[in-house]
């Protein structure tokens, strides 16, 4: 069973701090990795994707990938109360199709 | 450009009934994937369709089936409903036929309650 693991949280950080969200995956052949944000009662929306080892930055968000350790993370700088949501890590385990395995998500609370 | 639409948004059924959910992808998108989301299990992959062909299937019983039409619209069907089928069913569409890091756009979901 190919798995994606996330700490369910909640992860509480003060406004303006850096939030660090982590995800591990079991399939070494995984090619691409995605972070989705899901507000309560809403559908997931993509924040970032990453497929090469290292860091990828987009505004306040940085995704980090370490394929040797099978680890992907998302950093949110200058966290805002509006960032409070559940963050889902997704791994594409079949590069020819859109078969994604999702983690169960980490609930982030940014305290004003 | 209109986003992914799903109908109906809410559905209440009783055990043993069957249900059909519909998904219209973003115009021009040819790949449609279906997911089941529950509080305990999170988002679980059901199946993916591209050009009317099922390309991949998750670990769900045969009661869950789907299809895609020539206009890329997709339906999923669940027969002999069980209480455990109560969930949010999400459809996602993607532009390209091959996953080359293109994102999936999710619809608002259909909330199914089985009584």
Image (spheres, grey):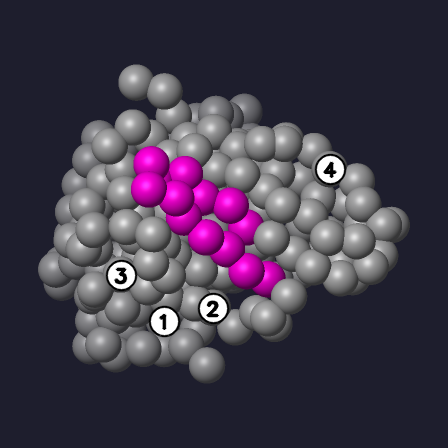
Q: CA distance from mark 4 to mark 2?
A: 23 Å
Q: Is label 3 in contact with label 1 (beta carbons under 8 Å)?
A: no
Drawn side of residue A43 relative to residue B19, left or right? left
- At x 23% / y 76%, what residue is drawn? A29
Residue A84 in the image, given as x and y percentages of width and height:
51, 34
> Compared with residue B63, is residue A8 higher up or lower down, i.e. above or below?
above
Q: CA distance from mark 1 to mark 4?
A: 34 Å
Q: CA distance from mark 3 to mark 1?
A: 18 Å
Are the residues under marks 4 and 2 on the same chain? yes
Category of crowding for the residue at label 2, using alpha-carbon neighbours closer than 10 angstroms: few (below 14), some (14–19), many (at least 20): some
> Compared with residue B26, is residue B52 higher up or lower down, i.e. above or below?
below
- At x 47% / y 29%, what residue is drawn? B5
Seen from the viewer's position, the closer of residues B12 and B45 is B12
Drawn side of residue B56 relative to residue A60, left or right? right
Residue A68 in the image, given as x and y percentages of width and height:
20, 77
User: Circle 1 sits in a helix, a strand or a loop, which is it?
Assistant: strand
Instruction: Check disc 1 and report the residue beneath it.
Output: A25
Q: CA distance from mark 3 to mark 2?
A: 12 Å
């Amino acid at each position: 069973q190919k798995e994606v693991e996330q700490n369910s949280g909640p992860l509480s950080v003060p406004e303006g701090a850096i939030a660090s969200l982590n995800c591990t995956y079991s399939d070494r052949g995984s090619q691409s990795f995605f972070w989705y944000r899901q507000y309560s009662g809403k559908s997931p929306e993509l924040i970032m994707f990453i497929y090469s080892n290292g860091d990828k930055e987009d505004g306040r968000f940085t995704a980090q990938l370490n394929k040797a350790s099978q680890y992907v993370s998302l950093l949110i700088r200058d966290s805002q109360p509006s960032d409070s949501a559940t963050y889902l890590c997704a791994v594409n385990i079949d590069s020819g199709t859109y078969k994604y395995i999702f983690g169960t998500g980490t609930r982030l609370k940014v305290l004003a | 450009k209109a986003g992914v639409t799903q109908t109906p948004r809410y559905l209440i059924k009783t055990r043993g009934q069957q249900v059909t959910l519909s998904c219209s992808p973003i115009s021009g998108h040819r790949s449609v994937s279906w997911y089941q989301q529950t509080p305990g299990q999170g988002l679980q992959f059901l199946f993916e369709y591209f050009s009317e062909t099922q390309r991949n299937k998750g670990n769900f019983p045969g009661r869950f089936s789907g299809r895609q039409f020539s206009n890329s619209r997709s339906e999923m069907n669940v027969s002999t409903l069980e209480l455990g089928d109560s969930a949010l069913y999400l459809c996602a569409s993607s532009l390209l036929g091959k996953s080359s890091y293109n994102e999936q756009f999710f619809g608002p979901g259909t909330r199914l309650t089985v009584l």
